Amino acid sequence: MSATEKLTAVAVRQTQPREKAYRLSDGGGLYLEVQSSGRKYWRYAYRYAGKQKTLALGVCPDVSLKAARTAHKAARAKLAEGIDPAQVRRVEKILRNQADAESFEAIGREWFDTKMAEKSESHRDRTLRLLEKDLFTVVGRQPIKAITAPELLAALRRIESRGALDMAKRARQAASQVFAYAIQTGRAERNVAEDLRGALTPGKKKHHAAITDPIELGKLLRAMEASTAGPVVKAALLITPILFQRPGEIRHMEWEEINDDRWEIPAEKMKMRLPHIVPLPSQALALLEDLKPITGRGRYVFPSARGASRCMSDNAVRVALRDLGYTNEQQTPHGFRATARTILDEVLGFRPDIIEQQLAHAVKDANGRAYNRTAHLKARTTMMQTWADYLDKLRQGAEVVNIRA
């Protein structure tokens, strides 16, 4: 090919590597550099302010001959205006990086790492899945300050279209926290998620299904005792109604948290961010003793079937209940909390404040302060053993005994 001859698409495609790198000129400083490895690069050689410079225009064949010529023409036009095209490229890159750093996704991940670090593992997992699946995929790449309320609403409507009304509500709340963080760090001026309060379809308040009739509860307990689930899942299934803590807290139970006849849950695992003590009745201790030879060498009392490095799936106990024939409309793992709350009060006659304390709800003392983890511990220990004994009686088919004072 002569020095004045222009390149053709066929010639570019047919170029072969040589022992040393070489160049094929297209004129005006544009050339194709063919390296010995076979890689091909478009370059523009020019002079600016008396210095020889080179501008990269892309990799062939990702950038075609036509595209390379278009970029070359634009660079020459800048040069004719007295502007260094390489400097233009640097400025564009800075602006691009700045836009990426101020995108909803970048700020959302920064918020998550900064503000969610002390939340429970299950809450962190749910929030990150929601961000990645439903928000980042729609508005993630946009600069956060450029996102409008209608654009965010469109992303939330997509969630609603799946029938996930509560999920859409949580997504708006998460987005609001990301926008608030962006405002605090000087990267946004308006929280458009707050403009959408009341814009979503209201979902019906859904309570966790729970059996509160003692006779029906006895039937359920007998079915659970006969469950054919694996030993780890069955132990979690059986201990859930006895301890009536949140399913996520039970799944994340660790052997090092068991201190004699107490389960001491650290604050970071609790919804209210306060440490919590669960007195362990003899029935719960027996279940843990039977399970220790199976999972006692690992971290979690109820590890995942896929590996001991993580805890049991949040669906394991729920599926075990379904296998027994109990639907989501009859009983859920979380529903055992309502079961215990109702029967401990209405049948067994325990004080509501003691029950609420054991449920790890936001109970306060007479001075308006949150109770500490050891508050009413003796009374709670008595209540937990009485409750476990009562469950045994129901399981054995005994008549319901009302011991309310």
Image (tube, rainbow, N blue to C red):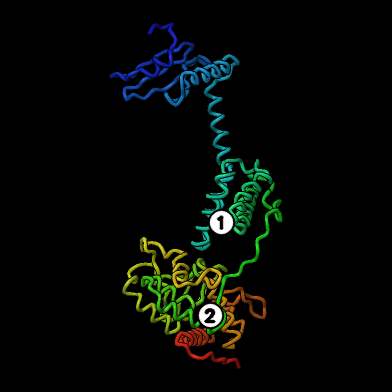
* Residue underneath mark 2: 374
Q: Is residue 4 above or below residue 196?
A: above
Q: Quadrant of the C terminus?
A: bottom right
Tell me the amino acid under the disc marked 1.
Lys
Give the mark, 1 or 2, whose residue is nearer the N terminus.
1
- The quadrant holding residue 9 is top left
Quadrant housing the N terminus: top left
Q: Note whether residue 372 is visible.
A: no
Residue at numbered disc 1: 115
Q: CA distance from mark 1 to mark 2?
A: 28 Å
Q: Residue at x 34, y 75 (%)?
A: 292
Label 1 element class: helix
Give residue 100's mark: none
Q: Nearer the viewer, residue 44 or 171?
A: 171
In the picture as drawn, the residue positioned furthest to the front comes out as 325
Indicate the position of residue 123 as horizontal and vertical percent values: 53, 61
Task: Judge whether residue 204 can be spotted in this image.
Answer: yes
Q: Amino acid at mark 2?
A: Thr
The one nearer the camera, 230 or 348, is 230
